[in-house]
Image (spheres, rainbow, N blue to C red):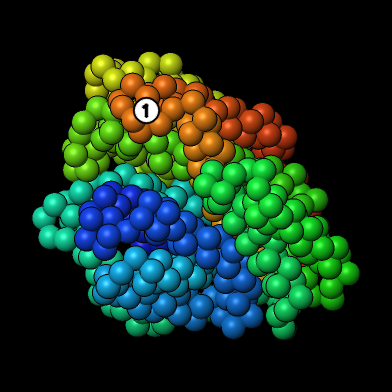
């Protein structure tokens, strides 16, 4: 659990911590606004596109070995980010970092799932989800401390010794496991990677290039066509990288839908909540991180409990209730946002939203992965991780488009004019996730012969 948590923490932390350094990077590297956007987007792009590929490589060559390779690649890429002499170098290094994260994220979750039996997997996934909560909670504060106290390069240098020290422990203390396939599925890898690239590229470029532009429409169309081709190929592949029988399980399908909309709402809130505190209300990066703790701290406090509760009462109440709380918290803040807003008025919405997300994430992950056999859980984790990242990119893109349409950065008032409608849409995304979660079967989860491992031989009763 600890070793898997290290990789998950590194990957999640670098999703949020860089945002605190953008203004400093812009000044020291003389970066343009578009280059700053790509400092964030290059990481998210390669992370999302290569997620299923990372899971497939782990299934084929060993999940422990793939996870160790991911730690090494992420550490080397982090050093390259810290040494960047210009914005172009930094963007390329961030893309390489994303490739390392695409190994870390699905394989860490798979290794945790493989280490616990199904009846205890919910509690384990809940505890594991709290690790990502630490990153979300500590990211803005750590970023502010490092940037103010040392320099922006150290937000990347910190990864290097942690990753390199962890590798020998991973190789000697974690149990190796593999999927059931004897070979990779190259056509499937190309189709799913190309499809994810087209969709993510279109979402990332939509606001800057224009949603009706040839570039964006063409990228989205190509992505959808390649994803449809991937589904058609998987139907007839001898050893599919994503068995479509997984989606016959209501638990798997509903859990993945919930995780998509949860992260769409969460990432859009992460993106705009810190900007509200800094741009509209005048706090510096460290002050912002500390004031976000009532929101982000709930991920750490509630997620482990939510996972254990899901094992006892089922995932549906936590998924539906948690996403409804996220919708209420985000909608509440959207209604009261104003340049004269006092911090104490924000604490209530922060707490409601934070508890809601902390309930929904481990429950949705357990719904998708909790009762899969060890040969299948790697592929399922890759699908879940990719949809999580795609949800985050989608949420930032569509919520950002609403903000750009009705608000801006000309003044604090202009910012809050855009913030209200944008976060109202974020609340709507959470509400859609809650509605989708109603399809989750109650406990006990429905068995699916193609998905859930069954004993090969009936064992005699033991007195």
Residue 89 horizontal/vertical position (percent): 36, 72
Residue 253 horizontal/vertical position (percent): 71, 47
- For image coordinates 49% across by 52% down, the residue present is 125
Q: Is residue 310 above or below residue 393?
A: above
Q: Is residue 453 above or below residue 309?
A: below
Would you identify the image quadrant in which residue 30 lies?
A: bottom left
Residue 181 horizontal/vertical position (percent): 72, 78
Question: Is 215 placed left or right of 209 in the picture?
Answer: right
Q: Could you tell me which quadrant the N terminus lies in?
A: bottom left
Q: Could you tell me which quadrant the C terminus lies in?
A: bottom right
Is residue 253 at all visible to an observer of this figure? yes
Residue 326 horizontal/vertical position (percent): 48, 29
Question: Is 56 placed left or right of 79 in the picture?
Answer: right
Tell me the residue that label 1 is attached to: 415
Q: Is mark 1 on a helix, strand or loop?
A: helix
- For image coordinates 38% across by 69% down, the residue present is 88
Q: Which of 79 and 56 is in front in this view?
A: 79
Is residue 366 at all visible to an observer of this figure? no
Would you identify the image quadrant in which residue 91 lies?
A: bottom left
């Amino acid at each position: 659990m600890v070793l898997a948590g290290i990789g998950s923490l590194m990957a999640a932390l670098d999703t949020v911590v860089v945002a605190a350094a953008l203004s400093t990077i812009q000044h020291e590297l003389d970066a343009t606004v578009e280059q700053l956007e790509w400092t964030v987007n290059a990481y998210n792009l390669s992370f999302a596109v290569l997620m299923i590929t990372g899971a497939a490589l782990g299934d084929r060559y060993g999940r422990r070995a793939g996870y160790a390779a991911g730690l090494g690649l992420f550490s080397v890429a982090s050093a390259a980010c810290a040494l960047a002499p210009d914005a172009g170098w930094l963007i390329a290094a961030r893309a390489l970092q994303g490739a390392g994260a695409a190994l870390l994220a699905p394989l860490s979750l798979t290794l945790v799932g493989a280490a616990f039996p199904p009846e205890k997997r919910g509690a384990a996934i809940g505890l594991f989800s709290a690790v990502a909560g630490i990153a979300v909670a500590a990211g803005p504060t750590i970023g502010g401390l490092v940037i103010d106290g040392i320099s922006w390069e150290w937000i990347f240098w910190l990864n290097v010794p942690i990753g390199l020290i962890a590798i020998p422990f991973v190789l000697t203390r974690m149990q190796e496991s593999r999927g059931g396939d004897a070979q990779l599925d190259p056509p499937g890898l190309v189709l799913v990677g190309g499809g994810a690239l087209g969709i993510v590229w279109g979402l990332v470029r939509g606001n800057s290039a224009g949603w009706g532009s040839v570039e964006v429409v063409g990228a989205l169309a190509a992505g959808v066509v390649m994803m449809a081709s991937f589904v058609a190929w998987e139907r007839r592949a001898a050893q599919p990288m994503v068995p479509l029988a997984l989606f016959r399980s209501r638990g798997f399908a509903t859990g993945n839908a919930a995780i998509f909309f949860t992260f769409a709402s969460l990432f859009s809130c992460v993106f705009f909540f810190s900007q509200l505190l800094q741009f509209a209300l005048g706090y510096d990066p460290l002050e912002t991180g500390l004031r976000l703790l009532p929101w982000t701290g709930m991920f750490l406090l509630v997620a482990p409990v939510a996972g254990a509760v899901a094992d006892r009462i089922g995932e549906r109440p936590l998924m539906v209730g948690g996403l409804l709380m996220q919708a209420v918290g985000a909608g509440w803040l959207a209604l009261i946002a104003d340049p004269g807003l006092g911090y104490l008025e924000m604490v209530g919405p922060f707490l409601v939203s934070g508890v809601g997300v902390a309930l929904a994430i481990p429950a949705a992950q357990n719904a998708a992965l909790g009762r899969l056999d060890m040969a299948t859980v790697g592929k399922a984790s890759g699908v879940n991780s990719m949809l999580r990242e795609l949800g985050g990119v989608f949420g930032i893109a569509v919520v950002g488009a609403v903000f750009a349409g009705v608000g801006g950065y000309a003044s604090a008032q202009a910012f809050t004019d855009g913030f209200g409608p944008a976060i109202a849409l974020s609340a709507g995304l959470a509400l859609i996730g809650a509605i989708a979660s109603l399809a989750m079967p109650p406990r006990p989860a429905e068995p699916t012969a193609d998905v859930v491992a069954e004993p090969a031989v009936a064992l005699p009763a033991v007195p």
